[in-house]
């Protein structure tokens, strides 16, 4: 698994979208047990904090200690530096495994082997993510789409295609459950939008190789634009049950 976010862990925590309670409620419809959940590649705990109220114990793992240090404290949550594909979790001990906005970085075969090892019979894997941002303001949205698809086209890691394909092209060797179409909706300031764009891994790759600022056209447009922006993200959600 790649670690692209340790160096930017504070900004990542502050600027990345939070997940809605609706997502966790949809997942929990399929989870029979509430004893132990594993939030894999938890980062700074964006999804972990949604799990904490529903499970007796939650283990949140990530390969980035810097990210985990930004995570919120809960009495029933343990944060540990562990790789997704190999953990110290006991066999058949987990009711729910979650992966939020990270599975595209994994070695799928090794990770799924580990998930099947630790899940209880009828335990659940939930893969969560969000797709490309859409800004309701047409002019700003056009600039954001241009940044994503043209300016940064050659700077995205190859794994990004799985998000472009809405996680439908990842292997998923579990008994898949039907879930509704969901989206995340926010009312952001221009600075919130810029801060989010600054967390893009492709932007970091661009800055490593160039001296100009590809966000400048968006920054200029935002200065002359509205005080708030309505933005949405399509939710990527796949839920599967471990077969006996």
Image (spheres, grey):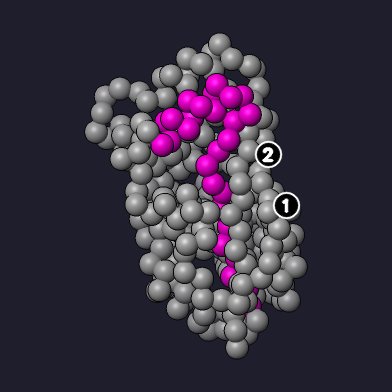
* Label annotation for residue 80: none
Secondary structure found at label 1:
helix
Picture quadrant of residue 97: bottom right
Where residue 149 appears, x then y in whole percent?
41, 37
Q: Residue at x 72, y 66 (%)?
A: 28
Where residue 132 appears, x then y in whole percent?
52, 42
Q: Which residue is mark 1?
A: 21
Secondary structure found at label 2:
strand
Residue 88 in sight from this viewpoint = no
Residue found farthest to the top: 224
Residue 103 in sight from this viewpoint = yes
Foreground pick, 14 / 188: 188
Where residue 212 appears, x then y in whole percent?
30, 22
Magenta stretch? Answer: 123-149
Which mark is first along the chain, 2 or 1?
A: 1
Based on the picture, tell me whether residue 124 belongs to the magenta stretch: yes
Q: Residues within 10 Å of mark 1 (few under 14, many from 20)?
A: few
Where residue 89 appears, x then y in whole percent?
51, 76
Q: Which residue is mark 2?
A: 185
């Amino acid at each position: 698994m790649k670690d692209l976010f340790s160096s930017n862990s504070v900004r990542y925590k502050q600027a990345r979208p939070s997940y809605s309670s609706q997502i966790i409620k949809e997942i929990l419809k399929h989870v029979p047990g509430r004893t132990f959940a594993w939030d894999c590649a938890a980062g700074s705990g964006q999804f972990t904090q949604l799990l904490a109220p529903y499970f007796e114990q939650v283990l949140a793992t990530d390969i980035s200690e810097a990210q985990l240090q930004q995570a919120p404290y809960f009495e029933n949550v343990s944060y540990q530096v562990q790789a997704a594909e190999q953990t110290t979790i006991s066999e058949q001990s987990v009711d729910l495994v979650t992966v939020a906005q990270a599975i595209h970085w994994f070695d799928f075969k090794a990770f799924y082997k580990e998930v099947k090892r630790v899940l209880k019979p009828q335990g659940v894997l939930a893969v969560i993510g969000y797709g490309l941002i859409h800004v309701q303001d047409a002019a700003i949205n056009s600039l954001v789409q241009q940044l994503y698809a043209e300016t940064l086209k050659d700077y995205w890691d190859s794994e990004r295609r799985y998000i472009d394909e809405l996680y439908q092209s990842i292997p998923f060797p579990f008994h898949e459950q039907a879930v509704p179409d969901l989206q995340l909706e926010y009312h952001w300031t221009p600075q919130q939008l810029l801060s989010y764009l600054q967390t893009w891994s492709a932007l970091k790759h661009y800055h490593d190789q160039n001296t100009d600022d590809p966000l400048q056209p968006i920054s200029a447009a935002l200065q002359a634009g509205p005080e708030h922006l309505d933005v949405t993200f399509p939710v990527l959600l796949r839920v599967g049950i471990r077969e006996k």
